[in-house]
Amino acid sequence: MRILIVGGGSVAEELIKSIDLRKNEVTVVDSDSSRCRDLSSRYDINVINKDATDVSLYTSEVSMTDIDSVISLTDRDEINLFVLSIAKVYNVPIRIAKVNDPRVAELVLKLGLGVPIISPSLTANMIKNYIDSVRSPKLMVEFDDFKLYLVGISETDKIVNKVIKDIELPPDTKILLLFDGSRLYPPEGEEVIGSGYQLIILSKVSEDELSNYLKG
């Protein structure tokens, strides 16, 4: 996949770290020359030092017809809106932008420009979900006999600081994913469950029964 990232800040760098650069071609655009030098020295990516609102970027320096995904991560909503508009003109199939104002996010959706990620709302929802799921497992979805739970782990829980493969679980129960505050990933069995972790668990048991196993 050919990915164009506009804005080379901390969010962009975390995204770059998560992308397999052997299988994907990444181009980053940023107006800060020192930031561009830093990124190009540490990652095998293409880096362009240019203002994202300079139309020549899209007409001469980047072959937009070959781009599969545009991700705009600048701190200015108006720039991210502009980038999504350009990407739509070139029919880029995947268009994502970070936005701060919910009204801008609504505009992005109404105009069909792409997918808006509302930074403050996303952070607030993650905190709220953690608080809610620390008290007891939070039912996310139910299908047939199975239930998908979100479980927040606190320092007083029964399974905190235990190796995941040694945790006793109810029958027909599986930990599908772990979130350690920085990444979401499937467990391999050797991870130690820390305080503050969130678990996504598939199970047939009730919230109370699952809570007895995990929280005591």
Image: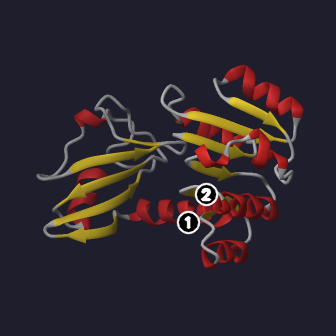
Q: Is residue 208 above or below residue 166?
A: below
Q: Are marks 2 and 1 in contact (CB under 8 Å)?
A: no
Q: Number of marks in the image? A: 2
Dot 2 amino acid type: Ile
Tell me residue 196's x, y (percent).
Answer: 49, 48
Q: Is residue 140 left or right of residue 119?
A: left
Residue drawn at the location 82% of the way across and 32% of the way down? 35
Dot 1 amino acid type: Asn
Q: Is residue 64 above or below residue 144?
A: above
Near-viewer residue (38 or 22): 22
Residue drawn at the location 24% of the way across and 40% of the way down? 167
Disc ID at residue 96:
2
The quadrant in which residue 114 appears is bottom right
Image quadrant containing the C terminus? bottom left
The quadrant in which residue 97 appears is bottom right
Tell me residue 72's x, y (percent).
Answer: 69, 53
Q: Secondary structure at mark 2?
A: strand
Can residue 216 be seen in this snapshot? no
Within 10 Å of disc 2 (Cα), the crowding (few <14, some 14-19, many 20+) is: many
Nearer the observer: mark 2 or 1; the answer is 2
Q: Secondary structure at mark 1?
A: helix
Q: Is residue 170 left or right of residue 4?
A: left
Residue drawn at the location 59% of the way across and 44% of the way down? 66
The tag earlier along the polypeptide, 2 or 1, is 2
Name the residue carrying label 1. 125
Tell me residue 161's x, y (percent).
Answer: 39, 36
Disc ID at residue 52:
none
